[in-house]
Image: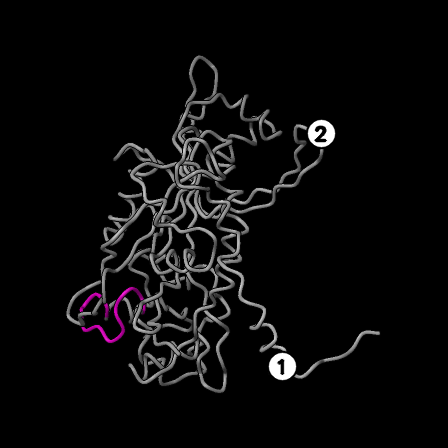
Amino acid sequence: MSKIFEIFGYPLGSEHADAKRCMRDARCPFLENDCDGGGNRYLSAINLQHNEKLREYFPGKIMVQAGVCSLNVKGKPWIVCPRRLLALDSPNASSLQAKVRNELISAGGLESNSGYRAWSEVKMKVSILNSNDEQKHFDYAFDYVLAGSCRQPISEIARLIKKTESACERIAVENHFTLAKRSGVTWVDDFPGEPILIVEIMTSSTSGGNKNNRTQIGMAFEDAILKGAEHEGPSINYRQVWARMASQLIVKSQVGLAWGGKTIWILQDVLADYISSSTGLNLEKYLSTVVDEVNILAFGYGAAPVPDRNKGVMKLQESKLYAGPISTSPKTEKGGGFVDIIKIGAAPPITHLWKALFLKSPSGMIK
C-alpha cells in the first residue's frame, strides 16, 4: 500500500505556518486559491457536515476537496495532482513553481517576461477532410494552450466565428480582450496569435481503493488528517495513466507541429522511468537540450527526498528534457522515434500464460 506524502502542497504533518494555513483554508499553494482536487476528483470531496471530528480542522467550511498532492509508494513520492506539477489557472503565478515555468519557457522557445496568456481545458471537436477527401474527426481537449497576441479587426473575427460584429464585441469584453477603435474600425488589440505552445500535464492516477480498508482517496485523506502517518492510501494505477498518455502523445504533438508551434508534455521523473521500463522506448536515449517533434519535460524531487516538517513546500529540484522525432528519421541516430512508445517493451514467454490460466478456473466453453 501507500501513504499520503503531501497534502495541500506540504509534506504530511508539516509544522510550517504556511502549511497550517493551507490546511485550515483547504487551499492549494500552487493555484493560490481553494484546492479543486486537481480538477478531476470531484467525487472525492468531503462533506464536513457528516464528519464532526474533521470539521474542527476546517473552520467555517462545509465541503473540502481531498487535497492529496502525492503518495509515497515504496519509498518514492508519486505526484497524483496535476496542480502539483504546474498550474496556469491563476493570473498570479505561484513562485513555488518558478523552476517548472522557467524550464517550460526555455524549452518552448518563448521570451521571458513577454506575457503569454494561458487558456486551460481548451476543447476542440471538429470534422475535417484530409488530403484524400476522407472525413476525419478531431475530438480532444488540451490542458493548456499558451499563445502570443496580434491585432485583428472585429470584422475579420466576425467572419471567423460566424457571428455579428456586435456579438463579437460582447464576447471580447466578456473574455477580457482589449477593444480599440481607429479611423472608424474596431480592433481587438490582443487577439490570440503566434507563437503557440500546447502544454499537457500527465500525473499518476490512483486506484479506486478499498472501502473496507479505507484506502479510497477520500478516506485516506480523512485518516491522514486525523491520525497522521497511521493511515493507508490507494495504489497507483499505472495502466490507466499509460493508456491516457499513449492515446494522445503522438496526436497532440502532430497538431502542435501542424499549427506551427510545439507541444510539451510535463511529467514526473518516476512516471518517465515507468514509460521507459514498460514500452519499446528508452527515454534516456532522447535526452536533449533542444525540442523536436515530441517533447517531454520530466521533473523530480531528487534522490531519496526526506520531508522537513519545519520547512515549506518541497521543491522539484531535477529536470530533464526528452525530445525526438515521431518516427524513424534520417536526422536521428537514436534508432527510432517516439512512436515506439506505443510498442510493447518485451513480450512475456508463453509459460507465463500457461501459469496464469492454470491458476484460474475456466469461465466457460465454446463448441
Per the model, the C-alpha gap separating discs 2 and 1 is 51 Å
- On the picture, is 189 further left or further right than 311? right
User: Element at badge 1?
Assistant: helix
The spot of residue 143 in percent (x, y) is 46, 48
Q: As displayed, is residue 47 above or below residue 188?
A: below
Q: Quadrant of residue 323?
A: top left
Task: Determine if the magenta segment contains residue 12.
Answer: yes
How is the rendered protein coloured? one colour
Q: Residue, x 53% and y 65% (percent of image)?
A: 348
The spot of residue 134 in percent (x, y) is 71, 33
The spot of residue 110 in percent (x, y) is 32, 33
- Mark 2, Cα crowd under 10 Å, few <14 / some 14-19 / many 20+, is few
The residue furthest right is 367
Q: Which residues are magenta?
A: 7-19
Q: Amino acid at mark 1?
A: Phe
For the N terminus, which image quadrant? bottom left
As drawn, the label of residue 133 is 2
Residue wearing tag 1: 358
Task: Determine if the magenta segment contains residue 199.
Answer: no
The residue furthest bottom is 212
- On the picture, is 317 further left or further right than 188? left
Q: Nearer the viewer, residue 320 or 224?
A: 320
Q: Nearer the viewer, residue 195 or 188?
A: 195
Marks 2, 1: nearer the viewer: 1
Q: Residue, x 41% and y 25% (percent of image)?
A: 150
Q: As displayed, is residue 218 above or below residue 112?
A: below
As drawn, the label of residue 172 is none
Q: Amino acid at mark 2?
A: Asp
- Mark 1, Cα crowd under 10 Å, few <14 / some 14-19 / many 20+, is few
For the C terminus, which image quadrant? bottom right
Q: Residue, x 15% and y 70% (percent of image)?
A: 310
Report the label total: 2
